[in-house]
Image (spheres, rainbow, N blue to C red):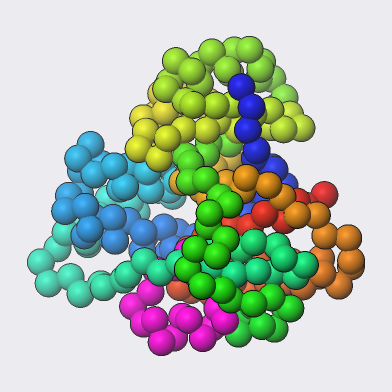
Amino acid sequence: MSGHSKWNNIQKTKGAADAKRSQAFTKIAREIIVAVKTGGSGDPKNNSKLAAIIAKAKAVNMPKDNIKRTIDRALAAGNTDNYEDVVYEGYGPSGVAVIVEALTDNRNRTAPNVRHLFDKFNGNLGATGCVSWSFDRKGVIVLNNDDEDLDEETVMMDALEAGADDLEVDGGVFVVYTGTDNLSDVTEALEAAGYTFDSAQIEMVPQNYVKLTEEKDIRNMERLIELLEEDEDVQNVWHNWEQD
């Protein structure tokens, strides 16, 4: 089994979420609300998008009570939360492909903010589809191996039995790939088998990577990612920068 995870990319995103857990919970809550409203159900068994987001919430230790309250809020009569999915695509320094996924109640606020950051850090916002063709949308589960006690063969067998499509071992880190529709099922099966997760979510996985060599480009790319992730409307930032 093989694939491309580039754990450094995932680790960087995870570190930002750990440092700003409250902000992470707020963004996931927004995703839950949208999933409930668009899926027409607060039951993850009948709403695959909601199930995937709940798996993501659990992976960052969002309390079950918070998840339930958010679902109830979305289902409540008179709820006026009205967010829409918006995806921006462009290029960072030296042609690094960047995808920004946002949930916003005001495109006229979000779009200028995202464009400003691309311009500020030597990138440029492009047209829809300009880079997404070079990414694959997959379920990605990163298994916690802090104790370094996971056996590759055992993990592979358990992942396959759980319904995973692929497994990659990257520097001692185990990354499980699934279809977008069965991320929740695979996560639950692996959780029942005793595994814990560093992350579990739908990701845009690059088909190839770009390595930056100029210090200025590296600094600009780091700041672009950091400030995009800090924007309250931005849910995810995907890119094909191969970080050391």
On screen, residue 152 above or below 200 = above
Indicate the position of residue 208 as horizontal and vertical percent values: 68, 47
At a point 64% along the width and 61% down the height, the residue shown is 97
Residue 87 vs residue 21: left or right? left
Quadrant location, the N terminus: top right
**Image point 68% across, 28% down: which residue?**
169
Q: In the image, is 118 to the left or to the right of 219? A: left
- Give the residue displayed 17% in from the left and 70% down from the top: 79
Question: Image height check: is 148 above or below 96?
Answer: above
Q: Is residue 132 left or right of residue 71?
A: right
Residue 221 appears in the figure: no
- What secondary structure prevails in the magenta region? helix
Front residue of this view, candidates 116 and 97: 97
Image spot of residue 11 (x, y percent): 67, 48
Q: Quadrant of residue 240?
A: bottom right
Residue 61 x %, y %:
48, 46
Q: How many marks?
A: 0
- Residue 211, position as x, y percentages in the image: 80, 54
Q: Is residue 78 above or below residue 235?
A: below
Please say whether residue 87 is one of the residues in the magenta stretch.
no
Which residue reaches farthest left?
77
Which range is magenta? 101-115
Q: Is residue 52 visible?
A: yes
- Please give the name of the residue rendered at 65% of the width and 40% of the height, measured from the top-left corner: 5
